[in-house]
Image (cartoon, helix red, strand yellow):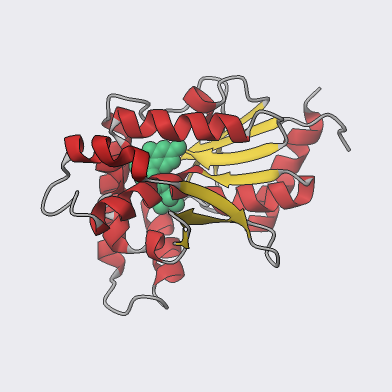
Amino acid sequence: MRTNKITIAIDGYSSTGKSTLAKALAKELGYLYVDSGAMYRAVTLYALDHGIISDRLDTDLLITKLPEINIEFRLNASSQVGEMFLNGKNIEGPIRSMRVSDWVSPVAAVSEVRTKMVAMQQAMGLDKGVVMDGRDIGSVVFPDAELKLFLTASDDIRSQRRFDELKSKSTDLSLQMVKANLISRDQQDSSREDSPLIKSPDAIVIDNSNLTIKDQLELVLKLVEGLD
Ligand code: CDP
């Protein structure tokens, strides 16, 4: 068992199980888990609820409103996982909706939004002992992370996993809608100018299409143990 704490960066496409792996790793290692996507989703929810998004995103208005957007993770005592709060309100449920998923990529492409989020993420990782998942964690947030992972899985498997996760909460959702959203977000996230989703050259790629959650965790724990 290693004694010195490290930083683990997990990036990859939508619904590749980044947060499932990150949560399990953090639990196993006694580390802090940070879902950076929840932060971009929180800003998007604010924009949707405050007339900043109608049929288009008003980027200038979003930038002026940024100081009014207070987001923080508060630890849920029973699950021991941080939950996303926006201006004092728990928003874990609404940020996972398709309404937010449909707009989060344009919001996350705004540089001023990214600057604010990245500063918070870097502050949370100052003492190491953190597992953070997202799109730019290994490339921008923690370029010196000791372990960088890049997760992938086939489009069909990813869509099915996300559909299974969401279908109990939303009856008017179809597998096709979920798949279209994943593919569209991947395309937008990979092609944006600021901090696009890329695989850092030093990241280890894991295709988990045919891996169980347990197998994947064991594989990554071995990688952690193998670091010197
Ligand atoms: O749906 P999934 O869990 O894969 O996505 P998420 O991690 O909740 O992230 C939602 C969206 O936030 C992504 O599609 C990106 O547009 C954005 N994001 C980002 O730009 N940078 C990050 N570090 C994390 C998320």
Spot the residue most to the left: 55
Query: Which of 6/226 is in front?
Result: 6
Quadrant hosting residue 166: bottom left
Q: Position of residue 70 (x, y in %)?
A: 43, 46
Q: Position of residue 178 (x, y in %)?
A: 31, 61
Whether residue 15 appears in this view of the structure is no
* Residue that appears at 35% across and 28% down: 196
Query: Which of 49/131 is in front?
Result: 49
| Ligand 1 location (quadrant) | top left
Quadrant occupied by the N terminus: top right
Left or right: 77, with 39 as reference point: right
Placement of 46 over or under 219, stated as above or below: below
Whether residue 222 appears in this view of the structure is yes
Left or right: 105, with 80 as reference point: left
Query: Which of 162/72 is in front?
Result: 72
* Residue that appears at 70% across and 64% down: 77
Quadrant occupied by the C terminus: top right
Placement of 218 over or under 198, stated as above or below: below
Q: Position of residue 2 (x, y in %)?
A: 86, 33
Placement of 121 over or under 202, stated as above or below: below
Q: Position of residue 159 (x, y in %)?
A: 38, 59
Quadrant hosting residue 146: top right
* Residue that appears at 58% across and 45% down: 34
* Residue that appears at 19% across and 49% down: 52
